Image (cartoon, rainbow, N blue to C red):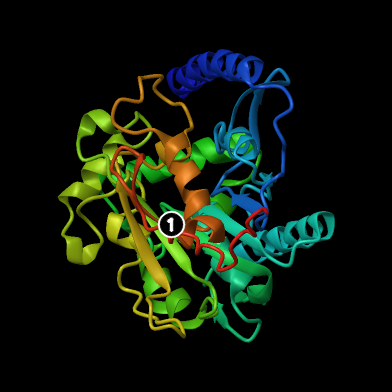
Amino acid sequence: MRYAKSLSKVIYTGSRNLIDTSLRKRLQPAGVAKSAHNEYPILMMHGFMGFSEMKIFNITLFEYFNGVKMLLEQMGYTVYTPSVTPISPPQDRAQEWADYVNEILAETSAEKVHLIAHSQGCIDARVLAAPAENSCTTGHFGDLHGIGFGDKIATITTLGGPHEGTPLADDMEGTDGEKFMIDMIEFIAMITGSNKKAAKQAIESMSRTYMLESFNKQIHVPKTIPCYTVAGNPGHAKNVSFMFDKTWAELMKMDPTEGGGANDGFVPVASALFSSNKVKMANGEPQWQALGEVVADHVALVGIPIEGKADEDFKHLPMFAGLAQNVDACYRENIALALQPDGEWSRACSLIPKQKSAKKSKATA
């Protein structure tokens, strides 16, 4: 079978992950509150061909945001990790996310949600937040318009988001990138039961040409929503999984002005950081703030175990812990966090001493 080697790697590393997850659950202290933290709930948004859990024979090998929900709930946050249709028009995916937001707000009685998104989920988040009057033509799926959920979203954090598209989804005729995309489309169609045309259209909707010339000009997140970006940058071939080694090398050879250079194997760093967006919020701060780059490829960003190698250069769980704290008002008032390449954080604390009471205790007779 053409993909037997790849599938065997996923199953092997997923089995190791299953054992690790089981041990962590057994070691979890009893009585840990699931949602003791007084903050908005967090909705995790998966990417293209995403899922909630990867199962083999009805046994969960790993989650898409691998181990993140358990960790953040142990920290006191309320976290949701649903899934939408893996391969679907952007408009349909955004509407599915909108239905989840309404369910979450009804269940928690919260006014807003924090969004943490990966890959195509980052584009879904922008469509979800954009006003309904924002619209453009996708070229593949007809008209696209905002869902108008800006007043229900507190913040948006994106990981490996193709905000300026990826050249891999453009015309790369005669390159290793083209061969990779053909293989990916066939693989996606095989494991999802979808047709090759739908898979090809979904990938092309993340093209550099479409994002720069159409989507970014018409679809805008309301200026009331702070947005944060993280990019994967393996830096060396040894940090790239078998899924992205060819495309990582292909993008590295391309000129940065054409979307090449540093990348995570699928999305260029500049595209993921969305550094070209210069929109200012009412307080004068940039709406889109780049948190930094981490030593991870496109799937390592969310902890999906592909190679089974030790997390020597990047640890996704500390990164997600800091991402939750970064949008947490309780932390932001006093603590400045800075993301490090290995996924960990440096922190600067500026606690203001509590003022002593002006009243003095009455002396006893």
Between residues 10 and 77, which one lies in front from this camera angle? Answer: 77
Density class for disc 1 (Cα within 10 Å; few <14, some 14-19, many ≥20) is many
As drawn, 189 above or below 128: above
As drawn, 188 above or below 158: above
Q: Which secondary structure lies at badge 1?
A: loop
Residue 33 percent across, percent down from the top left = 72, 36
Is residue 121 in sight in this rendering? no
**Residue in the image at 63% along x and 56% along y:** 363
Q: Disc 1 designates what residue?
A: 161
Between residues 170 and 220, which one lies in front from this camera angle? Answer: 220
Name the residue furthest front: 365
**Residue in the image at 31% along x and 37% along y:** 342
Residue 51 percent across, percent down from the top left = 63, 40
Between residues 206 and 161, which one lies in front from this camera angle? Answer: 161
Check the picture and name the quadrant holding the C terminus: bottom right
Identify the amino acid type marked 1. Gly
**Residue in the image at 57% along x and 48% along y:** 46
Is residue 102 in sight in this rendering? yes
**Residue in the image at 47% along x and 35% along y:** 317
| Left or right, 199 with reference to 43 | left
Residue 11 percent across, percent down from the top left = 53, 18
Q: Quadrant of residue 280?
A: bottom left
As drawn, 351 above or below 33: below
| Left or right, 102 with reference to 72 | right
Residue 259 percent across, percent down from the top left = 26, 61
| Left or right, 269 with reference to 54 | left
Tally the marks: 1
Between residues 138 and 260, which one lies in front from this camera angle? Answer: 260
